[in-house]
């Protein structure tokens, strides 16, 4: 799996806004589940250590525990970032002219340092043709 999520503009162009949004939620929650499982893995590793192991076994358990903790933190950050971005874009996905939600076509995407993803996405309403920018 790639480290950074596909650029939102490219993904929305490819999948359409609604499918993109749905996938962000599904992937975000998959990361949440991953975080929980790795937290459990960490807890089990720590629990087993206290039963008294050989040095080698203890080192393995410590490594499993540390790996689980790192994965848990990473998954938690991914979950937050993905859901934040999905909500941020969704909040701007309603047409200002006809109030239609999520029926938009990408017109263009340009660099914008002040936008959340570093890109400003120009979109057009599929219903009435009104254009606006998602930043
Ligand atoms: Zn519209």
Image (spheres, helix red, strand yellow):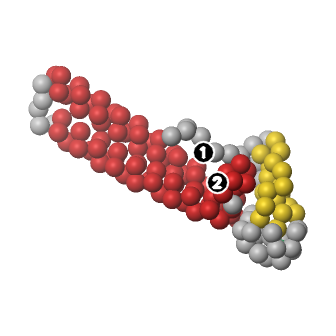
The reply, left or right, for residue 116 in relation to residue 25 is right
Q: Along the line of sight, which residue is nearer the eye, 129 or 134?
A: 129
Mark 2 vs mark 1: in front: 1
Q: Looking at the image, which residue is at 27% across and 30% down?
A: 62
Locate residue 33, reporting x and y percent.
Answer: 40, 54
Q: How many marks?
A: 2
Label 2 beta carbon within 8 A of ligand 1: no
> In which image quadrant can residue 105 be found?
bottom right
Q: Quadrant of residue 85?
A: bottom right
Q: Residues within 10 Å of mark 2 (few under 14, many from 20)?
A: some
Give the residue at mark 1.
Answer: 5
Q: In the figure, 20 relative to 5: above or below?
A: below
Q: Position of residue 60 (x, y in %)?
A: 23, 28
**Can you tell me whether the CB of the residue at mark 1 lies under 8 Å from the nearest atom of ligand 1?**
no
Q: Distance between the Cα atoms at labels 2 and 1?
A: 10 Å
Q: Is residue 37 left or right of residue 26?
A: left
State if disc 1 and disc 2 touch (CB < 8 Å). Answer: yes
The answer to whether residue 88 is seen in the rendering is: no
On the rendered structure, is 99 left or right of 19? right
Residue 113: image quadrant is top right
Residue 15 at x, y percent in the picture: 66, 57
Tag shown at residue 29: none
Of marks 2 and 1, which one's residue comes earlier in the chain? 1
Residue placed under numbered mark 2 in the picture? 85
């Amino acid at each position: 799996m790639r480290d950074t999520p596909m650029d939102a503009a490219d993904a929305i162009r490819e999948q359409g806004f609604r499918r993109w949004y749905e996938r962000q939620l599904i992937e975000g929650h998959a990361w949440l589940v991953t975080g929980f499982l790795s937290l459990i893995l960490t807890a089990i590793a720590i629990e087993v250590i206290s039963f008294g192991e050989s040095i080698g076994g203890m080192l393995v358990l410590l490594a499993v525990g540390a790996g689980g903790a790192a994965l848990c933190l990473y998954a938690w950050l991914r979950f937050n970032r993905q859901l934040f971005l999905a909500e941020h874009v969704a909040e701007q996905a309603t047409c200002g002219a006809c109030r239609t939600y999520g029926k938009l076509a990408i017109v263009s995407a340009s660099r914008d340092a002040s936008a959340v993803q570093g890109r400003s996405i120009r979109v057009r309403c599929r219903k009435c043709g009104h254009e606006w920018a998602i930043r």
